[in-house]
Image (cartoon, helix red, strand yellow):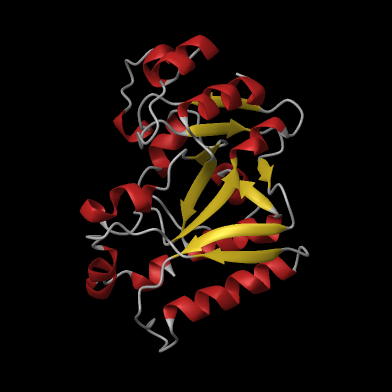
Amino acid sequence: MTGAEVHKALVAAGVTQLYHANTVTTACTFLSLAGLASRGYVERKGLAQTKQYTDADDKVYGIWQDVFTDGVDVHARGGRKNGANQYGPISFRLPVGCLLRLPVATDVMVMKKNPANWKTSDKAGDRYFLTPADLQSFYSFGTFAQHVVFRVPEGILPFPTDSVEVLLDDPQRKLQSGANAFLDAQTRLNAAAKTRGLTVSYLAPTCPWDCVCRANYLKSNKIDDLF
């Protein structure tokens, strides 16, 4: 579908922003590229990114070159159960209007279910909304699995402005090096953004009143992998 077709359906469903969550390491790479990049692009260029458990399947299913976003802040909606976003502590936030200003020949797809739950026997209609009418009728705001996916010819979805909005978790703990995880992340992100003349606008994550993210961060043994 075109960006305009998807934009119309998402706005009608109440979507105002698109989100992409990742680790600080991968986020720094995105800032150095001035846009969200597919995992295939980052791998091809030999740049830094954190491994994800879905990497092997993404290659098999032909989505290794795609850029994933969500129409909902997963941390805000799932924090009371899962705590921090499982993909990483930083979420880029893009206005839904970016769908109207895409690189030439960009295809936009909206998934019906997370690729982690795909089967080899699936048909295209089992995985994606295939028409604008189908999307408008059955897209459900807040459903995590309904990812908005960009297939950009160059592999990079450019940030819409020079000021990049990010939500950055504060785990209130130190890295193995002894550095404060939150402050160290900001330093690295700012340095990466500076290489492309970008600035980072930090937003506090929206935690439900009973969010368990802080407790999960405090007991995590993978803090250095995330930050």
Q: Residue at x 59, y 78 (%)?
A: 187
Percent coordinates x, y for residue 1 in the rendering: 60, 18
Percent coordinates x, y for residue 26 in the rendering: 53, 59
Which quarter of the figure has residue 199? Answer: bottom right
Asked if residue 131 shows in the view, the reply is: no
Using residue 81 as the reference point, say whether residue 148 is left or right of it.
right
Number of numbered discs overlaid on the protein picture: 0
Q: Residue at x 59, y 23 (%)?
A: 8
Q: Nearer the viewer, residue 28 or 215?
A: 215
Using residue 139 as the reference point, say whether residue 202 is left or right of it.
right
Q: Is residue 57 above or below residue 5?
A: below
Percent coordinates x, y for residue 156 in the rendering: 67, 43
Percent coordinates x, y for residue 226 in the rendering: 41, 66
Which residue is at the far bottom? 178
Q: Nearer the viewer, residue 33 or 1?
A: 1
Using residue 155 as the reference point, say whether residue 162 is left or right of it.
right
Q: Is residue 211 above or below residue 67?
A: below
**Quarter placement of the C terminus:** bottom left
Which quarter of the figure has residue 100? Answer: top right
Q: Residue at x 68, y 28 (%)?
A: 106
Asked if residue 184 shows in the view, the reply is: yes
Q: Nearer the viewer, residue 165 or 60?
A: 165
Q: Residue at x 40, y 32 (%)?
A: 141
